[in-house]
Image (cartoon, rainbow, N blue to C red):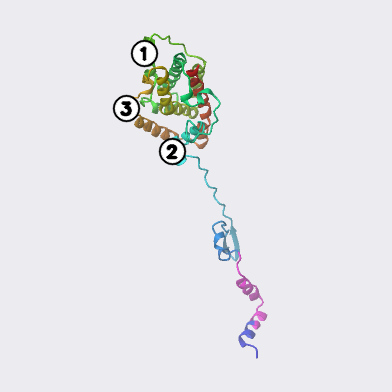
Amino acid sequence: MASLTSISQSHSFLMKPHLINTAITSARPNYFSSNFLPLWSRSFFKLPRMTQKNGVVVVSATTAEKPKKRYPGEAKGFVEEMRFVAMKLHTKDQAREGEKEVKEPEERPVTKWEPTVDGYLRFLVDSKLVYDTLEGIIEKAPFPSYAEFRNTGLERSEKLAKDLEWFKEQGYTIPEPSSPGISYAQYLEELSEKDPQAFICHFYNIYFAHSAGGRMIGKKVAEKILGGKELGFYKWDGELPKLLQNVRDKLNKVAESWTREEKNRCLEETELSFKHSGEILRLILS
């Protein structure tokens, strides 16, 4: 004997055919529901949101937001980004993170250098020209941000002037600036007027490189040709770590107002900064 309930339901569908579509629709499983996706896939797929308006299903697509690209060192501030790029341009002997192959004489370990006093004087004279130029630009401040870097305690021009005076007292002839120093000074003057981000790259690399590898080079060279005498070029008034940190903070503050494109332009200038500095450093071996 057939179930009265089943007969009753069948009768309802025959008498009211519009109920068939509703019944089938409600019985059909929604394969697009997250309940029908395996757990591992739910974090990879974001289903479109479906709402019903006046009996019509409206599907609104959601666009996945692209993750922001992070640059090496960015989380610690822009100075760390500059440091990261600079370290890659060192050789393995110069820095643990270095990737550059040794090609030039000054890139060899300092212990293998054969410096001369005349070459060292050329290096000091050209270095002074570059520092004179840098410190003059900072003083004039063609861009207001440059003024942040006045009187940081890292200035080297006066120290170099006294060192050259000492050499003169020892009977040495002080040479005129040579091509590497003149070219770099002219480039810095031009750059400072039109591209502050690129100029700041040179400012950072010149001062910070001298406070690190530059000091080590000065010590080794002095041991070989000056009887170990420490020049004022390698001395600072005050605690060097604190002076450097103060400038780091200022650099990070200035860079906060830069766009990503401006920051990248600054980073891209690093290789040229190393090229000019390397040409001046090479004078020690001339």
Residue type at the position of mark 2: Gly
Q: Is residue 189 visible?
A: no
**Occupied quadrant, residue 124:** top left
Left or right: 244 in relation to 178? left
Please state which of residues 5 and 264 is positioned toward the viewer in this rendering.
264
Quarter of the image holding residue 148? Answer: top left
Q: Which badge, 1 or 2, comes first in the chain's sequence?
A: 2
Quick check: marks 1 and 2 in contact, CB under 8 Å? Answer: no
Return the disc, 1 or 3, that comes first in the chain's sequence. 1
- Residue visible at 39% across and 34% down in the picture: 249
Residue plotted at (42% across, 17% down)? 225
Name which residue type carries label 1: Trp
Total marks in image: 3
Asked if residue 141 is among those painted magenta in the image, a careful observer would answer: no
Lower position in the chain sequence, tag 2 or tag 3: 2
Which mark lies nearer to you, 2 or 3? Answer: 3
- Say if mark 1 contacts mark 3, CB within 8 Å: no
Residue receiving disc 3? 238
Q: What range is drawn magenta here?
A: 10-31
- Mark 1 or 3, which is nearer the eye? 1
- CA gap between label 1 and label 2 equals 41 Å
Q: In which quadrant will I find the N terminus?
A: bottom right
Q: Position of residue 227 (x, y in %)?
A: 38, 18
- Residue 14 falls inside the magenta stretch: yes
For disc 2, the marked residue is 77
Structural crowding at the residue carrying mark 1, measured as other residues with C-alpha within 10 Å and reported as few (<14), some (14–19) or many (≥20): few
Left or right: 184 as drawn, with respect to 136:
right
Check disc 1 and report its element: helix, strand or loop. Answer: helix
Instruction: Find residue 95 and report its horizontal and vertical position in percent.
Output: 47, 33
- Residue 166 badge: 1
